[in-house]
Image (cartoon, rainbow, N blue to C red):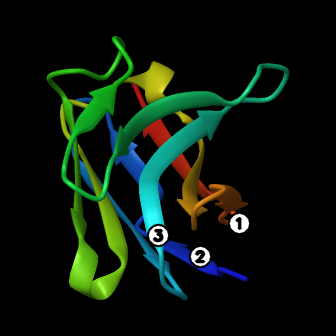
Amino acid sequence: QVQLVESGGGLVQAGGSLRLSCVASGSGINVMGWYRQVPGKQRELVASITSRGRTNYADSVRGRFTISRDNAKNTVYLQMNSLKPEDTAVYYCNVDQGLVGIRYWGQGTQVTVSS
């Protein structure tokens, strides 16, 4: 069983920056990532990173957001720059663990970008 603890959300003006963090308990963590969801819409991938550091970004955030991880600390970060009002959402940390890739979700952290 993996538990995820997220932090770093909040309210920021457009053009500002925020950094999200997610600490995972347990071992055997493979891909770590961030998703986001707004009411009435499906949860969407924002960015992900493999244990070897390969990254993947949604087109809407590429060039503005940077995902990174510290494998020794089982922590994934999402540096969000040049934030836009349309980035407003609940952001969820997601990891998969073990050979079968069991997926776990964080509790979510609200990011609000004011115009």
Residue 29: mark:
3
Nearest the viewer among 57 and 60 is 57
Q: Relative to 76, does residue 16 appear above or below in the rendering?
A: above
Measured as percent of width and height from the top left, residue 107 is found at 71, 66
Kindly identify the amino acid type of the residue bearing the numbered disc 3: Ile
Distance from disc 2 to disc 3, alpha carbons, whole Å, reads: 11 Å
Task: Please name the residue shown 57% across and 55% down the image.
Answer: 94
Within 10 angstroms of label 3, few (less than 14), some, or many (20 or more) residues? Answer: many
Q: Position of residue 22 (x, y in %)?
A: 44, 70
User: Label 2 amino acid?
Assistant: Leu
The reply to whether discs 2 and 1 touch (Cβ–Cβ < 8 Å) is yes
Identify the image quadrant of the C terminus.
top left
Q: Report which quarter residue 5 is drawn in.
A: bottom right
User: What kind of residue is marked 1?
Assistant: Gln
The residue that label 2 is drawn on is: 4
Q: What residue did someone put label 1 on?
A: 107
Q: Which residue lies furthest to the left in this view?
A: 63
The first of marks 1 and 3 along the sequence is: 3
In the visual, does 54 lie left or right of 10? Answer: left
| Sequence-wise first label, 2 or 1 | 2
* Discs 1/3, front: 3
Residue mark closest to the camera, 2 vs 3 = 3
Q: Which is more N-terminal, label 3 or label 2? A: 2
65 lies left or right of 88: left
In this rendering, the count of numbered labels is: 3
Horizontal placement of 100 versus 46: left or right?
A: right
